Image (cartoon, coloured by chain):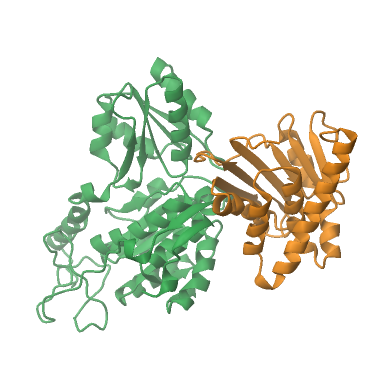
Chain colours: A orange, B green
Amino acid sequence: MTASPERQVFITGFGGQGIVMAGDILGKAATLYDRRHATMMQTYGPEARGGSCSSQVIISDREILFPCIGEPEVLICMSQEGYTKYVKTLRRRGTLIWDTDLVKSRKSAAGLTTFNIPATRFAEELGSTMMANIVMLGFLAAVQNVVSAGALRDAVADSVPPATKENNIRAFDRGREYGEAILKGRAKQGLAGESA
Amino acid sequence: MSDKSVLTGTWFMNGDHACCEGALAAGCRFFAGYPITPATEVAERMSRRLPELGGIYIQMEDELASMAAILGASWGGVKAMTSTSGPGFSLMMENIGLGICTETPCVVCNVQRAGPSTGLPTLVAQGDMMQARWGSHGHYEIIALSPSSPQEMFDFTIRAFNLSEQYRLPVIILADEVVGHMNERVVIPPAGEIEVVKRRKPTAPPGEYRPYQPDADGVAPMAGCGEGYRIHVTGLTHDERGYPGMNAATQEQMMERLIRKIRANRDSIIRTENVFLDDAEVVVVAYGISARSARHAVQEARAKGIRAGLIKLETVWPFPEELIRSVASRVRALVMPEINAGQMVLEMERCAGGACPVRMVAHHGGALIPPAKVLDAVRKALKGRP
């Protein structure tokens, strides 16, 4: 995977999962650590928790003028509703990532590179489901190089409450190791990606 | 100024937070407001930051009281602001007029969302442009700035405070949901590099000071409460002493001062960014978040060999009449994208005065105007198609 001039990541889930925070950390990694340009937009409904929510991040070497993503290149789904609503917006040959336990019903879409991780379950095992977003970022760092993995890890450490830093870094590493293991397995089988 | 008031450094920050930091860097130490999406993050950050700096944050019972409180704080001698969105902005209108009549420096940030009424609380619009100009009763001049990025939220908030202190009036920041909620790089310079205008205090002895007697620039020095000067602050028509005068002569004298101090200084108040104007056949004029779509479209047009130009309005009020008039006389068409059904475009048409067609790209709100729509309008304008 080589870095293209502009990367577009769309993260969707429900309020309270840290969807916007995940987008913020991704943008922060790109801007403050990789020293590139990034915009992060958030979308949510009138309700604060439980309602559908998403964040969209654009990362580029050039100034980003229009901050909306029409057809995301990477779509991360942390809810069934988010999956159902946005999977059709994913561009051809895009990358689809979902939380194994939160997206159960999937329509097959040909030509996509797909990954899934039980991010919320892993976060729970590490002490709090609140870290599912961080597990997911670690996973993203392994399977897609939208930002450098070191930048993303530093941005996580810099963004979470100091008392939870160690735990969140463990969550990040857990996601990253899981992603690396999946890639290794696929490389062995000579597969670039799994077809959904 | 303490170190904590200016967060020097590079941040990945949203526009609402950048607005708060701009205000603090400009010396704001009083915020009164009522939370409302998508402006809540300004108030929220203020509620944490102001107490650290010895300032005061008050959550008021509503927006009428919020606006009244910042006027009072300003007369108390501190720089004060509030932030709101459409419904709250409507409630502030009467007291914005009081601020204009009493020549009270303060800043109102309106993070616009789609209306009318409750509308789309979490989604973007630019529908309050004319309300900012004419929303309070009576005739008056106003200053409004329109940022298009979190960085400009920081920069323009500082400028809003400076203009409000210099010209003694409420200055409006017309932001929008996307600018307010979007995160982007924000560079905050060292405190010493930030230009901050201090309130001009009277030099005349207390017995001779007239609170509304203007200096050469048309603006009167302002004494605060408890500074030894006799002041009378009223929304009634008043003379230079501040005393009510219920007659046409006093009204004329007051109105002339309120209007002249802005009109006579328009060249230093109005700022625009002009791109590719020299050889442009079509010029896109845009403000706020829509200026990003406009710039994108103009860059794409140039790449295709279309001679398009851009005027980005940093100051939306007063409107840059002379610039639009002169550009209209030498281009084939003007194009304006805005997230309403036609507000600033009316000013464009007035200034173009038939010298060239003015084409608008309208949107009712809830989403941004795609650059392709602006480019399409540029193309059609060149071909003279409806």
Q: Nearer the viewer, residue B384 or B61?
A: B384
- Residue B196, given in percent of the width and then of the height, sits at 30, 64
Note whether A9 is above or below B96 in the view shown. Answer: above
Residue furthest out toward the left? B208
Q: Is residue B179 left or right of residue A157?
A: left
Residue lying at 58% horizontally and 40% vertically, measured from the top left: A68
Residue furthest out toward the front? A188
Can residue B201 be seen here? yes
Can residue B88 be seen here? no
Residue lying at 21% horizontally and 58% vertically, measured from the top left: B258
Note whether B219 is above or below B262 in the view shown. Answer: below
Residue furthest out toward the right? A189
Where's the C terminus of chain B, which quadrant? top left
Residue lying at 49% horizontally and 69% vertically, measured from the top left: B46
Q: Nearer the viewer, residue B209 or A101?
A: A101
Note whether B213 is above or below A18 in the view shown. Answer: below
Note whether A156 is above or below A165 in the view shown. Answer: above
Residue lying at 50% horizontally and 60% vertically, measured from the top left: B17
Q: Is residue A110 left or right of residue B323?
A: right
- Residue B362, given in percent of the width and then of the height, sits at 48, 34
Q: Nearer the viewer, residue A111 or B282?
A: A111
- Residue B338, given in percent of the width and then of the height, sits at 45, 38
Question: Residue B332 occupies which quadrant of the picture?
Answer: top left
- Residue B30, given in percent of the width and then of the height, sits at 41, 73
Task: State how many labels appear.
Answer: 0
Q: Is residue B155 left or right of residue B200?
A: right
Where's the N terminus of chain B, which quadrant? bottom left
Q: Is residue A18 left or right of residue B216?
A: right
